[in-house]
Amino acid sequence: MGWLMADLYRDLLITARDFTLNSGKEPEICNNRVSIGQDIKHSIMESGLATELLAERSPTMKADIRTRIILLVESDIRLIPGTIEISEESLGAWLLTAETYDFSDSLIVRIGV
């Protein structure tokens, strides 16, 4: 039997902007890295920066928005400052990676379509 890490962070799982329900029609719970990733994604969306990034065509302005997103995300005390990176995965889809203090694997958050 493998070592199980306790849930440091717990939240209701959101999928497609709605609660994810289990077979008993109860909200599903997410934990740890999934919870952190969900919080990061929602903070970017609520700030309006995701919309700005997806709408912007100028490479210079996109770089500025990416910097603003990195500064926003670095304010989360669960993430290691200086480890946040944003790259364009495809047209209209961005990938954010970061390292956390509590978990060894990289946190991956998709932004956009």
Image: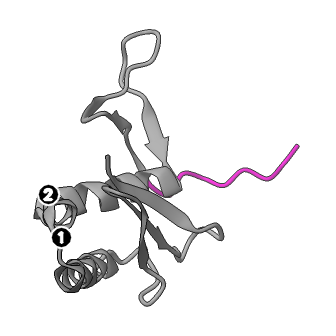
| Rendered image: mark on residue 57 | 1
Give the percent coordinates (x, y) of residue 40.
32, 62
User: Magenta segment, principal secondary structure?
Assistant: loop
Mark 2: amino acid = Glu
Of residue 42 and residue 113, the one placed in the foreground of this image is: 113
Residue at 32%, 46% in the rendered image: 113
Instruction: Read off the magenta span.
Output: 1-9
Q: Is residue 107 above or below residue 75?
A: above
Residue at 37%, 18% in the rendered image: 26
Of residue 93 and residue 96, the one placed in the foreground of this image is: 93
**Relative side of 80 to 68, left or right:** right
Give the percent coordinates (x, y) of residue 32.
51, 55
Give the percent coordinates (x, y) of residue 85.
44, 78
Mark 1: amino acid = Arg
Mark 2 or mark 1: whose residue is earlier in sequence = 2
Residue at 15%, 68% in the rendered image: 56
Provide the residue designation for mark 2.
46
Of residue 95 and residue 71, the one placed in the foreground of this image is: 95
Q: Is residue 16 above or below residue 68?
A: above
Badges 2 and 1: C-beta atoms under 8 Å apart? no
